[in-house]
Image (spheres, rainbow, N blue to C red):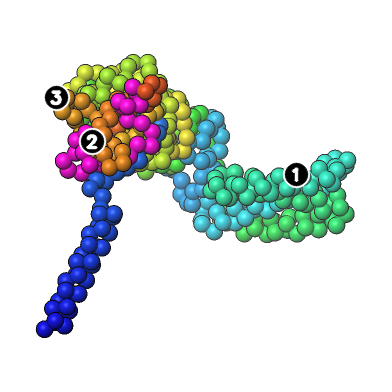
Amino acid sequence: MKTFVFRIIVILFSVFLIVNVCYQLYLRSYEPFETEVVYQYTVDKLIRSEGFVFRDETILEDKSDGEVRYQQPNGGRVAKDSQIAVVYRSDQDALRDSEISEIEAEIALLKAAQDPGAIEGTALEQLSQQIENAHMALVDCIQSQNLSSYGELRSQLMELVNKQLIVTEKETDYNTRISQLEAQKQSLQAQMSAEPTVIRADLSGYFVDQVDGYEEVAPLDAATSFDANSFRTFLDETEASKDRTALGKIITSNTWKYTALIDQDDMIHLSEGASVELDFYQTGESYVKANVESIQASGDNGQALVVFSSELMSDEIALLRRHSADIIWGEATGLRVPKTAIRFNSQGVRGVYIQFGREALFRQIDVLYEDENYVISAIHNVTDSDRSTYLQLYDNVIVKGKGIYDKNA
């Protein structure tokens, strides 16, 4: 009987010990609140918009009968009578002409490398440094994926290497190679089924190799012909023309306008003549400088109409038409606070609770800017009163918790 009682006591003590240990571990790991450290951020102050790009354009009718190869990039500046495209009778002719161009480029590099005037007096050490610099520039071009200058950098490097071979007398000249390339060129020229047709620009401007069907309904002067209601109708009902084939178009002026609808409450952030930046985030074209040309009072749908003008042009801008854009009208620097952390104390003051040891302390915030998820609060840390009243850098703000009030453990 005594043995049985002793066993019961041991079992009960063991259970008590296990429960106590588990409870202590739970207390150590239990966090009644979720917190987030406050950091300083600089954010863009922006306005969401929906709009349409207007510009003066001339369509290039497609009168070609064959394979078209464009000679100008989208958004590239072209002068009147400059070559914008070449039309070949067949795809094979286009490929042959491309090979001819590559051969001609290589011949030019070899002739430049063995030019006595360019070689005479060239210091080998200086040439080696130029090769190293050209090589590094080519590597940077590839790593940054900015391949627009790849061809030019590659040609520069090849010319320098070929010149080095002449200077170090590893090659006397490139005449044999040039003769071989000339023979290849003549052979390809003989295989061409017909002479390609060159298409030239009828006027100067910026070339685009496609049309979007809105060219005739979106001239530059139409940008300012709407009020908020009629522009809403324009966006909802205007469709692109699909019955026209074209070789491309010429944007005849670098001035273009973006007419957009914004929320009425955002009008206070804009004024006529002000400079802003447009972020067409759906296209990758960001921070385009523009001026506010006009602002019209809101329409029936609670939106205001704003017209922006810009003189910047690029391949992406040349293709813009109907797009949403963020209008960046300033920036704010301060403490970024999640909106889930914002509370009002018993006096109705807006702020947050921070975790200070095992206590929750209320700290005011001074909102400079806010979006859907965060606010940016001004930094107040000059005096002791500031530091005990306002949120501070690296404070742990409580983003989730129940029953929170000052100095509540």
Residue segment shown in magenta: 385-409
Q: Could you tell me if residue 230 is visible in this image?
A: no
- Circle 3 Cα neighbour tier, 10 Å, few/some/many (<14 / 14–19 / ≥20): few
Q: Tell me, yes or no, whether the highlighted magenta stretch contains residue 389.
A: yes
Amino acid at dot 1: Gln
Q: Which residue is mark 2?
A: 407
Q: Earlier in the sequence, mark 2 or mark 3?
A: 3
Q: Nearer the viewer, mark 2 or mark 3?
A: 2
What is the quadrant of residue 238 in the picture? top left
Q: Secondary structure at mark 2?
A: loop
Amino acid at dot 2: Lys
Left or right: 61, with 123 as reference point: left
Numbered marks: total: 3
Left or right: 123, with 211 as reference point: right
Q: Earlier in the sequence, mark 3 or mark 1?
A: 1
Q: Secondary structure at mark 3?
A: loop
How far apart, in angstroms, are the residues tagged by discs 3 and 1?
Answer: 65 Å
What is the quadrant of residue 186 in the picture? bottom right
Q: Depth check: give the residue in front, 176 or 189.
A: 176
- Give residue 281's position: percent from left, percent from top: 37, 39
Where 313 sits versus 34, above or below?
Answer: above
- Give residue 299's position: percent from left, percent from top: 17, 23
- Give residue 38's position: percent from left, percent from top: 35, 37
Q: Which residue is mark 3?
A: 300
Q: Which residue is mark 1?
A: 130
Q: Depth check: give the residue in front, 251 or 333.
A: 333
Left or right: 226, with 45 as reference point: left
Amino acid at dot 3: Asp
